[in-house]
Amino acid sequence: MATVHGGLDVTELRSLGLRPEEVLDFSANINPLGLSQRVAQAAAETDLSVYPDRYSSDLRAKLAERLEIGIDNVMIGNGSTELIHLLARSYLCPGQKCLIFAPSFGEYEAAAIAAGGDVYIVQAEEAQGFRWPIDMAVYTIRRIRPSLIFLCNPNNPTGVYLGRDQVRRISRAMDGHGLFVLDDSYMTLADWQWNSISLFRDGNIAILRSMTKDHALAGARLGYLVAQQSVASAAQHLQPAWSVNAVAQAVGMAALEDEGHVAAARAVISEAKAYLCGQLDTIGVPVTASAANFVLARVGEAAAVRAALLRRGIAVRDCTSFGLPEHVRIAVRRPEECVRLIEELKEAMRHE
């Protein structure tokens, strides 16, 4: 079965007589300001008659310069999802163990299963604010000695954000065995941030990031990995030729020169999320405390609420696939768009 994701399903919209441009998409957690002018111009000026650089050399060099690391510590991927699957193939053989902090992004489990790995779960519960039991996680890691660990931080869909000390404690529990993949794709748009990049020097930690989220590049697909050279090289050898297309590389270069666009987005997110959480509380919809640019809301029958909203031209993420059938995930968009969401949600919950 294919992993469920956010974003609009054109076939579903057609069945409802809707066009994508008629729908406000709160199901995808990307920069609410959309593409910057600089990025859009770079995409338009890309020469599509030329093969892309197989190794994304210019983009890797620019990222290495910005992050103050070596170019051999950076790998570019067709979105972070490709990198997740490449790492799983690099570190898992049939029967080897993969530990996942859940509920979380479905591609971790999909990648582990595709590689033949046995999946183990550290589960966060709503009663504890979806915060993981770190003591139990450390015990489990020491007991099963996983070859691969996936942690999304801030986490999708809960928005829970662990600090450096907690992350390091998980890493050290591995005692040098296997690879710890820290996916901080949502860090840049979070309420507060700590810089995880230096952790790759510990040796057993790989950092995943997504320019898709930061710069609204969902259609281009662009992510990157920061890791020890041996880790990056092993994944690189498994990557298909020309996996990262010319447009993705061009817009990635432009995006790195337009960090003001991300700073502006953070300001919009801060204002809109405060409004959104306050209004959800007012109408009696419990929200999990989130550091990220999305919130997890308990609405009752999530599938029914999502369907009712979609008929009204609003898309949210039904979290049933995360094991949360009473919750929807709502991305933070512009304040005026959040106003419309709240009004439509009131109507949807009144009639469902």
Image (tube, rainbow, N blue to C red):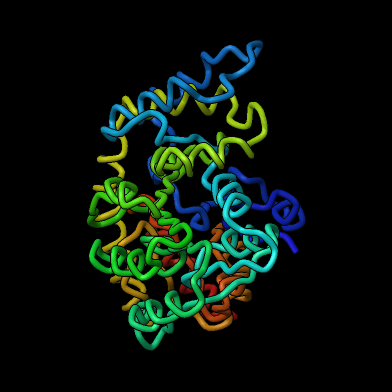
Report the side of 177 relative to 191 (left or right): right
Q: Residue furthest front?
A: 176
Which one is in front, 103 or 111? 111
Query: At x 63% / y 51%, what residue is drawn?
Result: 89
Which one is in front, 303 or 91? 91
In which quarter of the view is residue 343 placed? bottom left
* Residue 135 x %, y %: 33, 82
In which quarter of the view is residue 318 placed? bottom right
* Residue 76 x %, y %: 49, 34
Query: At x 43% / y 71%, what residue is drawn?
Result: 296
Query: At x 54% / y 81%, what residue is drawn?
Result: 326
Asked whether the viewer can see residue 285, the reply is no
In which quarter of the view is residue 39 placed? top left
Which one is in front, 185 or 268? 185
Asked whether the viewer can see residue 240, the reply is yes
Q: Quadrant of the C terminus?
A: bottom right
Q: Is residue 135 above or below residue 151?
A: below
Q: Residue furthest bottom?
A: 127
* Residue 179 x %, y %: 46, 57
